Image: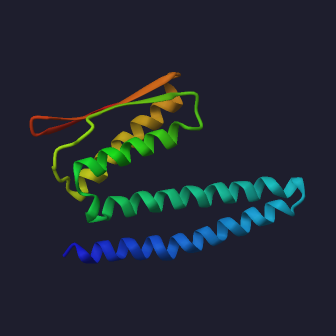
Amino acid sequence: MQAEPDRIARDIHDDLGSKLTQLLLAGEVAQIGSAPAAGAPLSQMCDSARNVLATIDEVVWIVNSQHDNLEDFAIYLCKYAQHFLESTAIRCRFDVAAEMPAKTLSQLMRRNLFLAIKEAVNNAAKHSQATELTLCIELVGSRLKVVV
């Protein structure tokens, strides 16, 4: 049953991803040879294509059953937060065990947790005026505790 969603995720990533990458590259090439006035719309188009590619990667990661374990989830969250905060003045700290227990997370749980944490990181960057953000991920008994 899980093979079909995995295949669909790969197809979306491969087909849509490659077409968006082609569009992005064409936009970047057009920016090089364009007049300054035409550069802003092309830049916006390229930024939008990058955002759509990132969203596709997130959806594919969530759907992929190979990432249903706690360790992969923690690694993905840390990479996401670090990448998101790169363009801000917020320093990102991680409080995550070096080795996570071999626990699995359902696709629904991965999706909902990721979206909640994504929103918390986004809100911290936009509204907190923070200089530092800590992402704490730990298993307390049988419960996953994530603190932003």
Residue appearing at x 39%, y 73% in the figure: 10
Using the image, determine if residue 46 lies above or below residue 124.
below
Residue occupying the point 24% across, 56% down: 108
Looking at the image, residue 14 sits to the left or right of residue 20; the answer is left
Residue 14 located left or right of residue 138: right
Give the left or right position of residue 41, taking residue 21 as reference. Answer: right
Q: Is 64 above or below relative to 100?
A: below
Quarter in which the C terminus is drawn: top left
The residue under the point 15% across, 49% down is 103
| Quadrant assignment for the N terminus | bottom left
Q: Quadrant of residue 60?
A: bottom left
x, y percentage for residue 144? 19, 39
The spot of residue 81 in percent (x, y) is: 44, 40
Colour approach in the figure? rainbow
Where residue 76 sits in the image (x, y, percent)?
A: 37, 48
Q: Quadrant of residue 88?
A: top right
Q: Residue furthest left?
A: 141
Of all residues, the one furthest to the front in this rendering is 98
